[in-house]
Image (cartoon, rainbow, N blue to C red):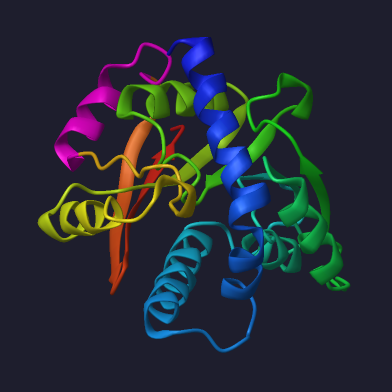
């Protein structure tokens, strides 16, 4: 992955979620009423979050978890409720500030350190588990796998992430999205064929020690995403 390409794409994502879409994401991730399209996205994201959490131990006491691309913090909160020490990071300072405002109190020993910044920052340290829910879907497949390799080097047990599976429905939604002015659109989602992603991961020299395990696809109206679990044996 070219460092300059990664920085350019990261900058586009940060600008969109911190400025253009911050209010929309604040509403989407709340209990406020939303329209049919956003309701389908909300339901899909809830299902995906539940899937990723189901792949983590029920008891996370003593475990350090990275929520890479935490948004408004819903997944981080659930991990902390299981006792985890969570470092939740997102490119958008606006969404991170909202996550801090929404953070509940935890009785089971868990805690969350919300930060705005780059999930690849080595200063974040080592983790037992890393979760990247819909945080890699805007990168080209080879670049996304390079990001996974960087994260895996600092992870002891598992890396859980989602990708946009290539399928006719997603391709159609991408085409419809192109009808809208660029200023109103998020950074493009980059679909990838599942077999290609498996091949890229399996052949990456820094991921050879990792096994590809469970996978599950969630389709909910305008939301399509697939989870994949990488485990260090």
* Residue 165, image x, y percentages: 24, 49
Please tell me whether residue 183 belongs to the stretch shown in magenta.
no
Q: Nearer the viewer, residue 186 or 85?
A: 186
Q: Residue 114's spot in the image, x, y percent?
A: 80, 49
Is residue 76 depicted above or below 86 in this figure?
Answer: below
Q: Is 12 placed left or right of 86 in the picture?
A: left
Picture coordinates of residue 127, whole percent (x, y)? 68, 35
Residue at the far front: name it: 181
What are the residue bounds of the magenta stretch?
A: 193-208
Q: Quadrant of the N terminus?
A: top left
- Residue 27 point in image, percent of width and height: 62, 74
Residue 218 in the figure: left or right of residue 170: right
Query: Left or right: 20 with respect to 114?
Result: left
Q: Residue at x 30, y 48 (%)?
A: 164
Figure quadrant of the C terminus: top left
Whether residue 110 appears in this view of the structure is no
């Amino acid at each position: 992955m070219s460092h300059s390409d990664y920085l350019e794409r990261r900058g586009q994502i940060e600008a969109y979620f911190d400025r253009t879409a911050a209010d929309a994401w604040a509403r989407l991730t709340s209990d406020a009423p939303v329209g049919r399209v956003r309701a389908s996205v909300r339901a899909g994201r809830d299902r995906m979050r539940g899937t990723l959490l189901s792949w983590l131990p029920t008891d996370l006491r003593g475990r350090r978890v990275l929520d890479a691309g935490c948004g408004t913090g819903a997944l981080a909160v659930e991990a902390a409720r299981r006792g985890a020490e969570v470092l939740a990071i997102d490119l958008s300072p606006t969404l991170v500030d909202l996550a801090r405002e929404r953070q509940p109190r935890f009785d089971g020993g868990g805690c969350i350190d919300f930060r705005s910044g780059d999930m690849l920052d080595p200063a974040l340290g080592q983790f037992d588990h890393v979760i990247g829910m819909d945080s890699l879907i805007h990168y080209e497949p080879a670049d996304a796998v390079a990001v996974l390799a960087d994260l895996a080097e600092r992870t002891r047990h598992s890396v859980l992430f989602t990708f946009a599976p290539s399928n006719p429905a997603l391709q159609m939604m991408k085409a419809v999205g192109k009808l809208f002015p660029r200023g109103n659109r998020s950074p493009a989602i980059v679909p990838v064929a599942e077999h290609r992603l498996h091949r890229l991961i399996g052949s990456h020299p820094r991921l050879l020690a990792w096994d590809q395990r469970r996978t599950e696809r969630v389709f909910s109206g305008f939301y399509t995403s697939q989870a994949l679990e990488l485990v260090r044996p």
